[in-house]
Image (tube, grey):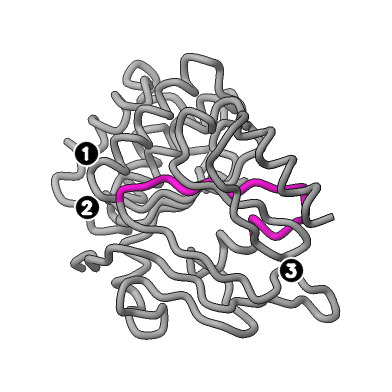
Amino acid sequence: MPDLDFSSVRVVEVSRTYGRRRALAKVSLEAPAGRVLGLFGPNGAGKSTLLNILATLLSPSTGQVHYGEYTSADAGDALRASIGVLGHDLFLYPDLTAAENLAFFGQLYGVRDINARVAEALSLARLTDRADDRAGGFSRGLRQRLALERALLHTPRLVLLDEPFTGLDDASAHILIGRLKTLAADGAIVIMATHDFDTAETLVDDAVCVDRGRVHPIPPGAGTLRERYRRVLQEIA
């Protein structure tokens, strides 16, 4: 199934409710190809809900998401084949080895030259020597590295990451930063939710604050990313 070629993702007046609880309220934003967008905000602010809507795992209660000229209803499976997701649930099978996990997901996505791609992914994750070990025996950091390569195995156009630095040591976080910068430089759209301001500082091109279901731009300017984020929170309080 061919990937769609879209140059931006636009969220237009998207709201999402769960009964009486409002998770998102008329959110609008745009993420262009070749850039990394960071989502920052308190726990429960709506970041994960927004990522799940972008991943087509949830439908908006109102509003639309446009992937270039397409909506998720227009593009269907071709769109989902163009999206890579790393969430809190790493979607790894503990009884399968690292190589078997990657091969399984690669087959689901119709990846060509699967053996070569699995070998490359294991190398990028620095897990070549653990290829035949069961994922259930890995530390959180090792599983995080494996899950990232699982999410990128099919070369997605849109990469969605929820707390991607969880469990990673400094060396692994540095490698992940380089990996995501390369993806963006190659034309992917990268959207990441994280609380790790210090690590994100060197990575994100654009940033927004998600608070109580609403999105507020974090403008560039004086101060660190954390300081600018806090200014936005003070302004909207």
Name the residue: 20% across, 44% down.
114
SS at mark 3 in the image: strand
Tell me if residue 231 is in the magenta stretch: no
- Pointer 1 residue: 117
Instruction: Rate crowding at label 2 as few (under 14), some (14 to 19) or many (20 or more) other CA atoms within 10 Å.
Output: some
- Where in the figure is residue 235, as x and y percent of width and height? 78, 52
Q: Which of pointers 1 and 3 indicates the residue nearer the eye?
A: 3
Is residue 86 depicted above or below 67 in this figure?
above
Using the numbered discs, state the Cα–Cα distance from disc 2 to disc 3 in whole angstroms. 35 Å
Specify the segment rendered in magenta. Answer: 34-48
Image position of 22 (left or right of 167): right
Residue 155 locus on image (x, y percent): 27, 49
Q: Residue 40 colored magenta?
A: yes
Q: Residue at x 53, y 15 (%)?
A: 170
* Image location of residue 18, percent across then percent down: 77, 76
Relative to 43, residue 124 above or below: above
- Residue 62 placement: quadrant: bottom right
Please say if the residues under marks 2 and 1 sit with CB atoms less than 8 Å apart. yes
Residue under pointer 2: 111
| Three-letter residue code for mark 3 | Ala
Q: Residue at x 29, y 72 (%)?
A: 78
> Looking at this view, is 41 or 122 the one in front?
41
x and y percent of residue 226 in the render?
67, 33
